[in-house]
Image (tube, grey):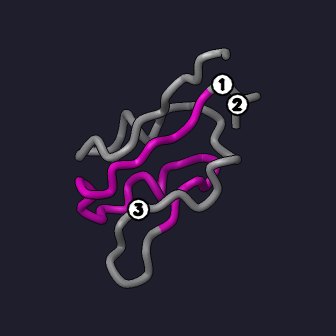
Amino acid sequence: MAAKGWTVVLDARWCKACGICIELCPQHVFAAEPLTGIVRLEHPEACSGCRQCELLCPDFVMTVEEERNA
């Protein structure tokens, strides 16, 4: 993911399994855990960095962090 310049970071402890991020992510980066519905990263490599997940999550579960050049 370093070539893209960003990475998605989840804090699933805050997730209330609303599914907003799963439904609205244009790249289908997220999925729900089968038993709990809690969000998880399914395809982090597909993230386009649009930050819709950050903007739309009511519980601030995920952030899109820019990576620093080493």
Residue matched to label 3: 39
Residue at coordinates 38% horizontally, 55% vertically from top-left?
A: 20
State yes or no: discs 2 and 1 in contact (Cβ < 8 Å): yes
**Residue in front for this viewpoint, 5 or 17:** 5
Q: Residue furthest front?
A: 70
The residue that label 2 is drawn on is 2
Where does residue 66 sit, x and y in percent of width and height? 54, 23
Residue at disc 1, secondary structure: loop
Q: Disc 1 designates what residue?
A: 5
In the figure, residue 15 lies in which quadrant? bottom left
64 vs 14, left or right, is: right
Q: Earlier in the sequence, mark 3 or mark 1?
A: 1
Q: Which residues are magenta?
A: 6-31
Q: Name the quadrant of the N terminus.
A: top right
Identify the residue at horizontal 66%, vertical 24% (top origin). Answer: 5
Residue 4 included in the magenta stretch of the image = no
